[in-house]
Amino acid sequence: MEGLFSVTWVVPIPPFLAFLAIILFLNSNKRGSALVAIGAALLSCLLGWGIAFASFFREHFGEHPIDEAIYTIPTGSSEFVIGYAVDPANALMLFMVPFLVLMIFIYSSGYMTFPGHLQGAQYPAAYAQGKDPRYSRFMAYICLFATGMLGLVVANNLLQFFMFWEVMGLCSYLLIGFWHEKAPARAAAVKAFITTRIGDALLMIGMILLYVRSDPSSLRFSELFTEHNLEQLAHSIVSLPLFGEVHWISLIAVLIFCGAIGKSAQFPLHVWLPDAMEGPTPVSAMIHAATMVSAGVFLLVRMFPIYAFAGEVSTGTLQFVAFIGAFTALFAATIAVAQWDIKRVLAYSTISQLGYMVAAIGMGAYVAALFHLLTHAFFKALLFLGSGSVIHGVEHGFHHAHEHAHGSDGNHSAAEAAAHQGEHIVRRADGALDTEDPQDMRNMGGLLTRMPRTGWTFIIGGLALSGFPLVTAGFWSKDEILAVAWDGGQQWVFWTLALAAFLTAFYTMRQIGLTFLGQARTPGASHAPESVASMTVPLLLISIFAIVGGWVGIPSSFPLLGGLVPNWIEHFLEPYMEFMHLHPHHPAFHFMPLAVSLVVALGGLGVGYRIYGQGLKEGQTDPVARLLGPIWWMWHRKYWIDELYHGTIVLFTLWLSRFLALFDREWVIDWIVNGVGRLAILFSELISAFDRFVVDGLVDGVGWVSDQAGHIARLLQDGRVQTYLLFGMLILAVWLFLNVLPMILTLV
């Protein structure tokens, strides 16, 4: 076991080596690129699971976590340590992340076929292979993405954590805009990059303050979370304009939280995540389950001692965190109710579920937050990969219908579809409909019979997301958060999350009904084939964890089931909490939160099935849209938050940039620079004149005098003694005049 822990630092290495191998040597070999990427993910998964299980079965592991240095860099009065850590929190992440990465890599090898928005005539070799022209590049990018998350998980200090955090930020930009031929994909990539950078900038400020104010100055987790350091951070105060006196630990906690707001797409920096659906679906699964947004919540889990001590000296800090989480959970759930894009529904669902985790951190529920992070990763990966399989099938269905309609080959069909893109948009009261959009749920229906493996695994994931009682993982992790809110007297958080849970169950059943139930509403749905094994086998494997993953966290106080299965995750994490000077809290069993959890889950599913259980008829308007009218439209338009940002922040930024451009080019900067240039030219001309007329004049004058003296002296060199005698007498006369005459005048 000790040997396994000593190779923890190796876990991120295989995907990184695969990234290098693909971009340097395998770019032209698509099959080889996929095999290398999958092999690297498999190796990381085996290492990660080996380390995870070694920690699961090691006695008193939470009391003696692993923290080892690999390399130290002197930084003046202290040292920066590069190393790795294994503790109960990241051991659980090492179980979840590599497995989902492996599943997504296998899925990607089948999913990344030739995209419909490209014309096969332009890429004949790729079209002949049936693969994306940039297939190898995609595999390289997701390898680097996996490297970022795995490196972040095993990091033993916050700066190293942040470095891998930024690697994922880069990869999200590259992968969201992977199909850069599409303008929305380019815009979404830029939007994601800029929005998350706002949170990252505030996070970096928090890191700097934490380093400066810590004793000793360090960002190593084992040194940050000593009781001495936490106490001195909690009891030192800084005076801020508008806020007055603030505890340093509260200020640092809020700044670090801003980084999580950006990465985990919490309000008000949530706007990038739905647009990120422009990227390939495996990227969406990576972002929503295995990497990007999970990293934001994991940051809060990692830094939880900061929040726990901040809550002891300033309750407002944790209340702020809980408010953002609860508000985002409900806010995003309402928007998901009124979306048609199958992936955007899941995107807003992710934002909402992350809100649950953030609210749990704000209530001090460390175990519940991490538990829901893990279960959510499994069923959300299942849902996103399932949605990709649906999109794939419907797209192939439309392709098949076009082939039969036009009697031509697929290449011509793809080119024709691109040429006529946008000609089949139907304006409807519930939003414009592209009748050949494979992601619009109005173009689906009846897919359960056409795609049974995809359909049933998607339903399993949807039930887990909805918190279907007792059976699914989502019920146990979500119920734990509701129980903590009720037991802690946080009524406003409890009822906000409960309402969000009802809406979650409702829009999940709406999604299942529109996609899989009823009758096919388009040729794409009626001809959709089941996806290939490389896409459906990962769905089957992940669906197991979407069910049994929650059984490790059944509370011992739960009626009938409590105690039958030990609450393993609680027992595993609590010794580590005590090691970090935290005090685990066990919420007492109350019938009310359980009853509410059952009602909202079953009620939401029931109401959703009542309305959408038979799907929709072709051309039918959404019944809820008819019922709610402008409210539904407000949800459909996402509360016009994007328009608000564009009309205020974006326009102001553009105006400021234009103003600064004028300030730079015409008014001040360039005027000063050009003025300095003109002064330099004038000064150089003056120096040139001085050089010509003074320096050169003096030098030329000395030469002229020397020349004239030479002419005179030459007259004396005639060889006559009389001339020399006369010249000597003249010299003597001058000497006498200069020396004797003053003496005579003095005597007189």
Image (cartoon, grey):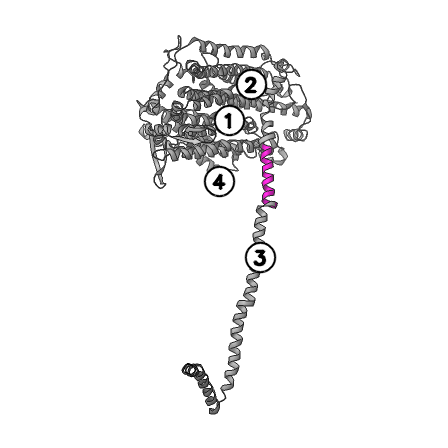
Mark 2 to mark 3 CA distance (whole Å): 67 Å
Q: Earlier in the sequence, mark 1 or mark 4?
A: 4
Q: Quadrant of the C terminus?
A: bottom left
For the record, the magenta segment spans 650-666
659 in magenta = yes
Q: Earlier in the sequence, mark 4 or mark 2?
A: 4
Q: Does dot 4 land on a helix, a strand or a loop?
A: helix
The x and y percentages for residue 679 are 57, 55
Q: CA distance from mark 3 to mark 4?
A: 51 Å
- 1 or 2: tag closer to the N-terminus: 1
Mark 1–mark 4 Cα distance, whole angstroms, equals 34 Å
Q: Residue at x 45, y 13 (%)?
A: 471
Viewer-proximal residue among 697 and 19: 697
Amino acid at pointer 4: Leu
Position of residue 193 measured from the top left corner of the image (x, y, whole percent): 53, 33
- Reading the image, the residue beneath label 3 is 681
Numbered tag placed on residue 24 in the rendering: 4
Q: Earlier in the sequence, mark 3 or mark 4?
A: 4
**Residue behind mark 1:** 265
* Occupied quadrant, residue 586: top left
The reply to whether discs 4 and 2 touch (Cβ–Cβ < 8 Å) is: no
- Distance from the alpha carbon under mark 1 to that under mark 2: 16 Å
Q: Which residue is mark 2?
A: 334
Left or right placement of residue 663 versus residue 105 in this view = right
* Quadrant showing the N terminus: top left
Q: Residues within 10 Å of mark 2 (few under 14, many from 20)?
A: many
Closer mark to the observer between disc 2 and disc 3: 3
Residue 557 visible, this angle: yes
Q: Quadrant of residue 56?
A: top left
| Left or right: 81 in relation to 505 | left
